[in-house]
Image (cartoon, rainbow, N blue to C red):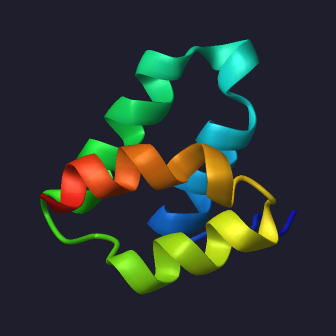
Amino acid sequence: MPVRIYPAAKTVADCSKFRNQIGTTVAVEALRDAWRPRKATADPLWHHAKVCRVADVIRPYLETVLR
C-alpha cells in the first residue's frame, strides 16, 4: 500500500490547522522542532501555511521563532 510522506513544513501547517483538536502547544512544538534543526525554512513554511489557509494563525508563531 503506498504511503505519502510530506515535508516538515506541511506537517507544521497541518498541526496549525488542526490546533483545536491536538492543542496549540503541540502546534507550537512542531514549529520549533522543524525550525531548530533546519528541517524547514521560512519560505516553505509560509507556502504551506497559505495553502492550508492558516497563514494568519501561524504568522505570530513564525515571527516569534524567527527572532
Q: Is residue 21 left or right of residue 59?
A: right
Q: Above or below — where is 29 with respect to 65?
A: above
Q: Please state which of residues 46 and 56 is positioned toward the viewer in this rendering.
A: 56
Q: Above or below — where is 23 with respect to 6?
A: above
Query: Which residue is found at the position 49% from the left and 32% from the top?
Result: 27
In the image, residue 35 lies at what x, y percent?
Answer: 24, 60
Quarter containing the N terminus: bottom right
Which of the 4 image quadrants contains residue 49?
Answer: bottom right
Query: Which residue is found at the position 42% from the left and 46% from the top?
Result: 60
In the image, residue 59 lies at what x, y percent?
Answer: 49, 55
Q: Is residue 46 left or right of residue 60?
A: right
Q: Is residue 39 left or right of residue 56?
A: left
Query: Which residue is found at the position 62% from the left and 44% from the top?
Result: 57
In the image, residue 53 lies at what x, y percent?
Answer: 81, 59
Q: Above or below — where is 3 with respect to 47?
A: above
Which of the 4 image quadrants contains residue 3?
Answer: bottom right
The answer to whether any part of residue 8 appears in the image is yes
